[in-house]
Image (cartoon, helix red, strand yellow):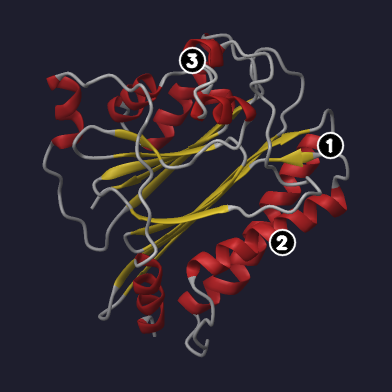
């Protein structure tokens, strides 16, 4: 029943791209490294734990972030296949426009992927998919874009979505929400590139890291859902760290906490739910200038 899904994974695996980590993450101490390098128990089927947390922050009156999480496991005599869909959206455009835009984007994307893919996992009579996972994710972004244009004209939103199937993660990304991987060897690696003016100026060498932190237009995006100019989302496939973590978060988190602190909080927490709440508390403790949303996915096997 799942043989065609394995073919999809093989097809997308040939297109896998690794984004180099050009951040300023500091080297880990031996104690920090031991947290993630300890030999883990082998689970059958592989276990995927998920936590989420949100906060309006300390300086905002309404929440313009939206998130979505779904987890499934299909295990039988043929295969053991974890499935997960994780979506993060950070709305913009002022009161109502931003929150309506992010909500519309998340719901449209989740609806499209669920309708196209979940029946293939659970239905005995479903036929094979004609699209690759990367094509599905790109079409999901187009559906989300149309939903934002219809329901929140004048508003916009980021969208960062991760589709986990087996050991492979396919990412769809627009804007400056982020996805990170945390590896067993102690690395925390950004897996998305920010579509922001300040990131482009950094890449061009026109700003230093210190200047970028205080740049007056650091929240300006050159690519987001809701913009009328045509754009292509970033669609990339990677192997999920296992054991390890994936983190999706809005800039209300990563813009306040350095990567190393994010790593330390997640790897020292008892579970992903505790990690998420601790991350939100730390961001609020650092001033909470924006809405904060985070999803932490832990792959135990």
Can you identify the residue that label 1 sits on? 97
Q: What element carries label 1?
A: helix
Q: What element does badge 2 sit on?
A: helix
Q: Residue at x 43, y 35 (%)?
A: 273
Q: Where is residue 151 in the image (x, y as percent from the top left)?
A: 86, 50
Q: In this image, 84 relative to 173: left or right?
A: left
Residue on which disc 2 sits:
143
N-terminal-most mark, 3 or 2: 2
Q: Are dots 2 and 1 in contact, CB under 8 Å?
A: no
Of 120 and 172, which appears nearest the observer?
172
**Residue depicted at 54% across the width and 72% down the height:** 117
The number of discs equals 3
Dot 3 alpha-carbon crowd within 10 angstroms: few under 14, some 14 to 19, many 20 or more: few
- Return the disc, 3 or 1, that comes first in the chain's sequence: 1
Crowd around label 1: few <14 · some 14–19 · many ≥20 (10 Å): many
Q: Residue at x 50, y 39 (%)?
A: 193
The answer for how far apart the CA atoms under marks 3 and 1 are is 33 Å
In the rendering, at what x and y percent does residue 285 appear?
Answer: 52, 10
The numbered disc on residue 208 is: 3
Say above or below: 167 vs 69: below
Q: Nearer the viewer, residue 225 or 284?
A: 225
Quarter-wise, where is residue 13 in the image?
bottom left
Q: Report if the CB atoms under discs 3 and 1 are less than 8 Å apart.
A: no
Q: In this view, does 54 lie above or below 237?
A: above
């Amino acid at each position: 029943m799942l043989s065609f899904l394995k073919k999809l994974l093989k097809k997308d695996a040939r297109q896998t791209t690794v984004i180099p980590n050009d951040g300023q993450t500091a080297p880990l101490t031996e104690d920090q490294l031991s947290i993630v390098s300890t030999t883990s128990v082998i689970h059958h089927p592989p276990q995927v734990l998920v936590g989420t947390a949100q906060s309006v922050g300390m300086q905002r009156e309404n929440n313009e972030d939206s998130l979505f999480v779904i987890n499934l496991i299909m295990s039988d005599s043929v295969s053991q296949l974890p499935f997960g869909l994780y979506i993060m959206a950070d709305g913009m455009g002022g009161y109502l426009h931003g929150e309506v835009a992010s909500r519309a984007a998340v719901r449209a994307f989740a609806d499209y992927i669920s309708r196209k893919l979940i029946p293939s996992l659970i239905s005995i009579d479903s036929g094979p998919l004609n699209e690759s996972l990367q094509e599905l994710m790109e079409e999901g972004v187009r559906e989300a874009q149309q939903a934002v244009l219809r329901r929140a004209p004048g508003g916009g939103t980021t969208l960062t979505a991760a589709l986990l199937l087996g050991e492979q993660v396919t990412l769809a990304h627009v804007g400056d929400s982020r996805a990170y991987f945390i590896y067993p060897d102690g690395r925390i690696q950004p897996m998305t590139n920010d579509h922001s003016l300040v990131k482009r100026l950094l890449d061009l060498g026109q700003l230093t890291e210190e200047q970028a932190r205080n740049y007056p237009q650091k929240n300006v995006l050159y690519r987001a859902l809701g913009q009328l100019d045509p754009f292509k989302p970033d669609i990339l496939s990677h192997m999920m760290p296992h054991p390890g973590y994936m983190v999706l978060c809005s800039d209300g988190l990563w813009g306040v906490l350095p990567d190393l602190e994010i790593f330390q909080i997640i790897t020292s927490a008892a579970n992903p739910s505790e990690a998420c709440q601790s991350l939100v508390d730390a961001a609020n403790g650092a001033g909470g200038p924006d809405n904060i949303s985070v999803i932490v996915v832990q792959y135990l096997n």
